[in-house]
Image (tube, grey):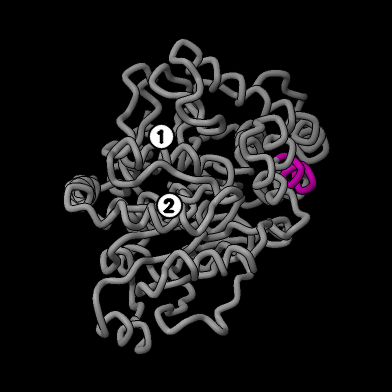
Amino acid sequence: MKIAVVTYGTEGDARPLAALCHALDAAGHSTVLLADASTLGTARRLGVRSQALAGDIQGALGASGSIANVVAQSHNPGAAAKALAAIANANAVAWLRQTVEAAQGCDAIVSAGLAAFVGLSAGDALRVPVIGAGMFPLTPTRDFATPFVPPAKVPRWLHRTSHRFVNAMLWRAFRPAINAARAEVCGLPARRKIWDGHPMLYGFSPSLLPRPADWPANAVAFGQWLPPAGAWQVPAALQAFLDAGEAPVYLGFGSMTGFDAVRMRALLVEAMAGRRTVFNPGWSGMALQGLPANFHGVGDVPHDWLFARMAAVVHHGGSGTAHSAARAGVPSVVVPFAGDQFFWAHQLARAGVSPAAVAGTRLTAQDLARGIAWTDDAAVRSRARELGERMRAERGLARAVAFIEATLAR
């Protein structure tokens, strides 16, 4: 089968889909991945055929960019929907044109991220089935509220409604630009209602978030989608640092930006108080120069390799990082900034492998120091090891490929 996969977002959005494409290719299928140019590094490393979509997600993540607005108003679903839609709406015509061209002759489209409605529209134009994909749950359920509202703040009787409400707000924010692109690129009629009924395939762990019993049969989650490590070699300086003492703590907030990097860097140094630390500044702009000797700076290091060698992982709570920390069998301290990060922070705390999260906009050195001290408890570390063992046994990619094959066969 030939399958086009389209997504738009940060590296955390594109990396698991590159892993899915690689697994589909290995199973004898032919894929092409469309995503932002800056997030296609994993696809290139794996030999996955890829195309860069129009736009610049790192530019949008700047101090005045749309995602920065999400960071500032992370618990306002309406503001978040508008900020996310601003990125997609500016590129809707270009993305739809590129997706339709790339998916010519394909048997299906897998559609995710900020390009989800573009992929669904391309499926309408080409009359091919579309499978939605996501790293957090979008399918309504009574078990938990939508990831885009504060966890545990919505009463159970409103859980399903919260999903429908946020999904409707997102569609309302995206709809004008999507409908204009449908008309201009494909000559398609405007859609009034959001798509419904297509299969949804999720790259998160049922050990961390059990599948809701009230989900339809075509909504499934089999486990994290991790790319193979390949021929990566540990840098000599990092290996020397790891060998020089006890297991360090990892600090890194991935693609998060739009916060006071100077303040955050000083806060991190104070909180660590001389404890051995592996520090990845990510896209934040925090400088590596002038850090104390207990800090070792790193760039892009495979999380599955690195986290297993850490005493704890301090991170922003993105789906991929949260899963990688849990899968490694080590405790987390989550400092969420935006979107579904609060949701995953809540799931890790519910599993007993992370303390209650403190938002990045409110974090103090004392908060972080208390969180790291919490992870030193033997019972916490035992729970983390047990959760990691369950997650490592899930075979998420293999089961996702089998689901796609069975779905398209029908």
Query: Residue at coordinates 60% horizontally, 76% vertically from top-left?
Result: 287
Residue range highlighted in magenta: 85-92
Which class describes the residues within 10 Å of circle 2: few (<14), some (14-19), or many (20+)? many
Which class describes the residues within 10 Å of circle 1: few (<14), some (14-19), or many (20+)? some
Q: Is residue 10 magenta?
A: no
Q: Position of residue 271 (x, y in %)?
A: 45, 64
Q: Secondary structure at mark 2?
A: helix
Q: Which residue is mark 2?
A: 320
Name which residue type carries label 1. Answer: Leu
Q: Secondary structure at mark 1?
A: helix
Figure quadrant of residue 296: bottom left
Q: Camera-side residue: 199 or 14?
A: 14
On screen, residue 16 above or below 285: above
Q: Which residue is mark 1?
A: 408
Query: Residue at coordinates 73% horizontally, 61% vertically from top-left?
Result: 59
Point out the tag, 2 or 1, that comes first from the N-terminus.
2
